[in-house]
């Protein structure tokens, strides 16, 4: 056994490093457990919400009620995540949960668009919950800048919003299948309004840019649906004369 | 609903040319998107974020370049455990200053919640650690500890707040430093025919018969490299962590460096005085992996 005290490496250096690594692994694993739970609950919420594609809009309130209940489970888990995550610097670990928080955010946005969370935002289908409103539903701060704690970031909200757009483009076609010719118009306008918003952002070459670039195809998809309907004179009459 | 009143007419929806012309400014005929003010807020936030990120990327690049130059000068040193020669010290002064300027410039951008946000600083941090640990080794024949290195970085940004040195960057910088030790050892062996050793009395001149380099009480670059290798190999970081994957990438290169010095020493011992003055061992042999930076 070489004499360590006289060697190049003070053994305390690597003992200390290993301690820190072990702490990190323990902390990360605790986060992962919570995030896995959240993932499961989010899948449940998404499964419920996807019933909207096969439910006539007059009856979506059942879907919305069920989704709200599933989202309440997500909220409980997010509260636990928030407590755990806030113990350490936010950006040291945020890659563990950022994808899941986007998905959670998307379920809330979709549910809100279907007129869930009636007490939040304006009443009626087709509403966009703001980042503050989503934060309110989740009971977490948003876009935190002056303190280092768990929160919902702008990027997470915006990426969730892109996912909402994709979901709605699908919903536009499925609404037609269900005989609802009014909803595609509503979706078309909504997507265009959101797209107009995105187009004023100065995006860099990152994941957000890539996802946002896809919105224009969703705009076109929904316009094609509206076009198909108008060609066959299927659009609601009151819409045509405004 | 406020938007219900201004739905676009169906005929307008035909207009496919609008597809490519989605900028709000151009749509003067139509009411503005109700979400614009919200997105204006996002734009301001994202712009700030991107500006910070770009400043950090630039600083990281400059710190990397300056650190590489420092390392390059340090490689002109042939002694161990001695003060840095004046000519090297003088040459490197400006690069240490550059590094300090760069850390100070971005320290404001990496405060509070942003401490771990801009990972692009990682490149600069690792290269800086490589230079710092290498110089520290040449001077003292010791590995500078994480705490000490961290303190050095803190000091550099101190005017406007501390700059964080993560444990990951420290360890990965130490990994890279093994490549510099290899270069240092091999150059010294080629020039003087012996392994650099800090110990004045027991210069480790390899001889065919008598003392082996493994004599327990004598330390030289190779024994130090082996000790460092053992310490680095012992670190237990799961592959599921990014840190674990980064270590995995560097491990092979580090082992190669140690073996290159071992092979060179073997050559020195076996061939001994047959070796022509100034002959350099072939460094590239047997390394199928990526080469050490700058070599």
Image (cartoon, coloured by chain):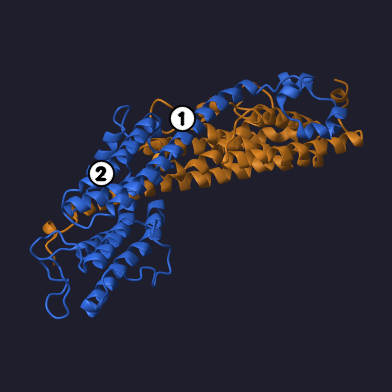
Chain colours: A orange, B blue
Please report contact status of discs 1 and 2: CB closer than 8 Å, yes or no.
no
Q: Which mark is residue B149?
A: 2
**In the rendered image of this protein, does residue B107 appear above or below residue A120?**
below
Camera sees residue A98: yes
Q: In the rendered image of this protein, does residue A24 appear above or below residue A148? A: below
The image shows residue B31, relative to residue B233, as above or below, that is above
- Residue at position x 31%, y 69% in the image: B280
- Label 1 element class: loop
- Residue that numbered label 1 is attached to: A140
Residue A125 x, y percent position in the rendering: 69, 28
A39 or A228: which is nearer to us? A228
- Tell me which residue sits at (72%, 37%) in the image: A216
Q: Nearer the viewer, residue B34 or B202?
A: B202
**Which numbered disc, 1 or 2, marks the residue closer to the eye?**
2
Do marks 1 and 2 share a chain?
Answer: no
In the image: residue A212, left or right of residue A92:
right
Q: Chain of mark 1?
A: A
Residue B60 placement (x, y as % from top left): 41, 41
The residue positioned 74% from the left and 36% from the top of the image is A219
**Whether residue A55 can be seen here:** no
How many numbered marks are there?
A: 2
Disc 1 from disc 2: Cα separation: 36 Å
Q: Where does residue B207 sit, x and y in percent of width and height? A: 16, 76
Q: Secondary structure at mark 2?
A: helix
Residue in view at x 30 percent, y 27 percent: B159
Give the chain of mark 2: B
**Where in the figure is residue B31, as x and y percent of width and height?**
75, 19
Given residues B259 and B206, the one toward you in this image is B206
Q: Nearer the viewer, residue B75 or A138?
A: B75
Label 2: how many Cα within 10 Å (few below 14, some 14–19, many 20+): some
Q: Which quadrant of the figure contains the N terminus of chain A?
A: bottom left
Query: Along the horizontal axis of the image, is B266 left or right of A98?
Result: left
């Amino acid at each position: 056994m070489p004499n360590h005290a006289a060697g190049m490496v003070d053994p305390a250096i690597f003992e200390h490093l290993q301690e820190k690594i072990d702490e990190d692994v323990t902390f990360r694993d605790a986060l992962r457990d919570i995030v896995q739970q959240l993932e499961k609950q989010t899948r449940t919420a998404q499964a419920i919400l996807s019933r909207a594609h096969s439910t006539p809009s007059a009856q979506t309130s059942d879907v919305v009620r069920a989704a709200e209940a599933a989202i309440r489970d997500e909220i409980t888990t997010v509260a636990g995540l928030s407590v755990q995550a806030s113990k350490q610097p936010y950006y040291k670990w945020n890659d563990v949960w950022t994808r899941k928080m986007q998905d959670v955010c998307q379920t809330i946005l979709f549910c809100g668009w279907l007129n869930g969370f009636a007490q939040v935002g304006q009443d009626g289908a087709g509403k966009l919950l703001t980042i503050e409103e989503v934060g309110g539903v989740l009971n977490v701060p948003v876009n935190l800048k002056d303190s280092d704690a768990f929160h919902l970031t702008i990027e997470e909200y915006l990426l969730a919003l892109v996912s909402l757009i994709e979901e709605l483009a699908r919903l536009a076609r499925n609404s037609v299948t269900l005989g609802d010719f009014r909803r595609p118009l509503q979706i078309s306008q909504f997507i265009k309004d959101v797209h107009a918003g995105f187009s004023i952002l100065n995006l860099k070459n990152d994941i957000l840019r890539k996802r946002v670039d896809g919105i224009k195809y969703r705009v076109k998809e929904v316009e094609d649906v509206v076009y198909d309907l108008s060609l066959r004179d299927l659009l609601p009459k009151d819409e045509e004369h405004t | 609903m406020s938007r219900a009143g201004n739905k676009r007419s169906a005929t307008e929806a035909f207009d496919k040319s609008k597809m490519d012309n989605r900028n709000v400014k151009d749509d003067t005929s139509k009411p503005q998107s109700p979400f614009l003010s919200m997105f204006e807020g996002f734009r301001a936030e994202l712009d700030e974020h991107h500006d910070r990120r770009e400043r950090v990327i630039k600083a990281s690049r400059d710190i990397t370049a300056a650190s590489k130059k420092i390392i390059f000068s340090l490689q002109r040193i042939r002694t161990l455990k001695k003060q840095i020669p004046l000519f090297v010290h003088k040459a490197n002064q400006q690069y240490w200053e550059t590094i300090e300027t760069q850390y100070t410039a971005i320290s404001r951008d990496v405060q509070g919640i942003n401490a771990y946000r801009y990972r692009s600083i990682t490149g600069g941090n690792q290269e800086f650690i490589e230079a710092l640990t290498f110089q520290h080794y040449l001077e003292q024949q010791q590995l500078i500890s994480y705490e000490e290195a961290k303190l050095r970085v803190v000091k550099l940004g101190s005017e406007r707040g501390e700059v964080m040195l993560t444990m990951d960057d420290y360890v990965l910088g130490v990994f890279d430093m093994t490549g510099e030790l290899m270069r240092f050892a091999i150059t010294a062996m080629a020039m003087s025919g012996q392994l650099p050793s800090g110990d004045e009395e027991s210069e480790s001149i390899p001889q065919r018969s008598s003392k082996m380099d493994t004599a327990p009480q004598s330390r030289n670059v190779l024994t130090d490299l082996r000790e460092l290798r053992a310490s680095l190999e012992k670190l237990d970081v799961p592959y599921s962590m990014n840190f674990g994957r980064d270590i995995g990438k560097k491990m092979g290169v580090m082992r190669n460096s140690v073996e290159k010095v071992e092979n060179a020493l073997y050559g020195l011992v076996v061939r001994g005085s047959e070796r022509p003055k100034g002959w350099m061992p072939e460094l590239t042999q047997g390394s199928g992996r990526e080469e050490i930076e700058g070599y």
